[in-house]
Amino acid sequence: MAVHTKVAFADAATLVAGYRLGTLNVLTGIDQGIENTNYRLDTSGGPVLLTLFERRTNGDDLPWLIALHDHLASRGIAVPPVLRADDGAALSTIAGKPAALFGWLEGAAIDDPTLGQCAGAGEALGRMHRALAAFALARRNPQGRDAWHDLAGRYGERLDELQPGLKAIVDTALARIEAEWPAELPHATIHADLFPDNVMAVGDSITGLIDFAFACHEVRAYDLAVTHAAWCFDADGTCLLADRSAALVDGYERAHGLLPEERAALPLLGMAASLRFLLTRAEDWFAWRDDIGVTRKDPLAFARRLRFYAAASSEDLMGPTPQ
């Protein structure tokens, strides 16, 4: 989450007046994350979350995202519930951007995960996948392999400005991922962006999953690979934190389970996850301005993860296959 778009208090108050929330008392921007704009709105009826959907979220996909939230909430998955205005609408426009109001989840976004939080995140991801087995609507992955090829082609030699030889590393990874992509694995709706700051917790207890802007229909195990890449390395992506990895995967196994072929594919899917975030961070890096109020994130942290996954076995990530 981040604040890309400034929202005036008067505009937010007008929006709140269309809901059964009372009056707006305080409007506070939420600085974590990078993709969409988020504010905490403290109303006389309690706090709510305002999300403005930014450039990487296609407005045509927003009804699907609302349906996804409704589906998960109806099955007891802890996600921010979508709030409806007095006229029944879930979506609105504010500051020229499509927006929605969500119920506020208790807890705080995770920064430096504990082992208990890693296990809890794995369990929450597994429970979410179980709930989504019955979700019939589908959305194409907006940040899938076509997008990676587009970004790699668009920035080309500029990637070497970040690290000499990075373009060749990206091109090699793209070719391998295309050649070995496990299209035969089970597909499902996935979160696709479950970084620690998209998970709410009180202590080691997970209280909710947030920010489904990149949710899509994709290879299911790719979701675990994204989460593994986000949670199980040190901050600069140099070292796998094996205890976190074991806790995350054990939690997922308890809640959902992995097929043998999914376990075998996780190193390649980890490469794919690392490449995705390397490229989108590179795009943000080159487009960054110091007046937008968002801290850009280092693409090379995911280049290092990419190198690790490219040489790893499934046992390196998860230990021996359970008998």
Image: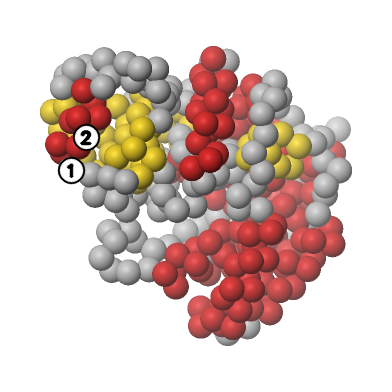
Rate crowding at label 2 as few (under 14), some (14 to 19) or many (20 or more) other CA atoms within 10 Å.
some
Above or below: residue 270 compared with residue 283: above
Mark 2 touches mark 1? (CB < 8 Å): yes
Q: Residue at x 86, y 43 (%)?
A: 184
Residue 276 visible here = yes
Q: Nearer the viewer, residue 122 or 186?
A: 186
Whether residue 207 sits left or right of residue 75 in the image: it is: left
Q: Nearer the viewer, residue 67 or 319?
A: 67
Label 2 secondary element? helix
Q: Nearer the viewer, residue 106 or 231?
A: 106
Pointer 1 residue: 8
Pointer 2 residue: 12
Q: In whole angstroms, how far apart are the C-alphas of marks 2 and 1? A: 6 Å
Q: Nearer the viewer, residue 302 or 80?
A: 80
Q: Residue at x 71, y 34 (%)?
A: 188
Residue 275, percent across and down? 63, 62
Whether residue 208 sits left or right of residue 152 in the image: it is: left
Above or below: residue 63 compared with residue 159: above
Give, as a three-letter code, the residue at label 2. Ala
Above or below: residue 64 compared with residue 273: above
Rate crowding at label 1 as few (under 14), some (14 to 19) or many (20 or more) other CA atoms within 10 Å.
few
Q: How is the image coloured?
A: secondary structure
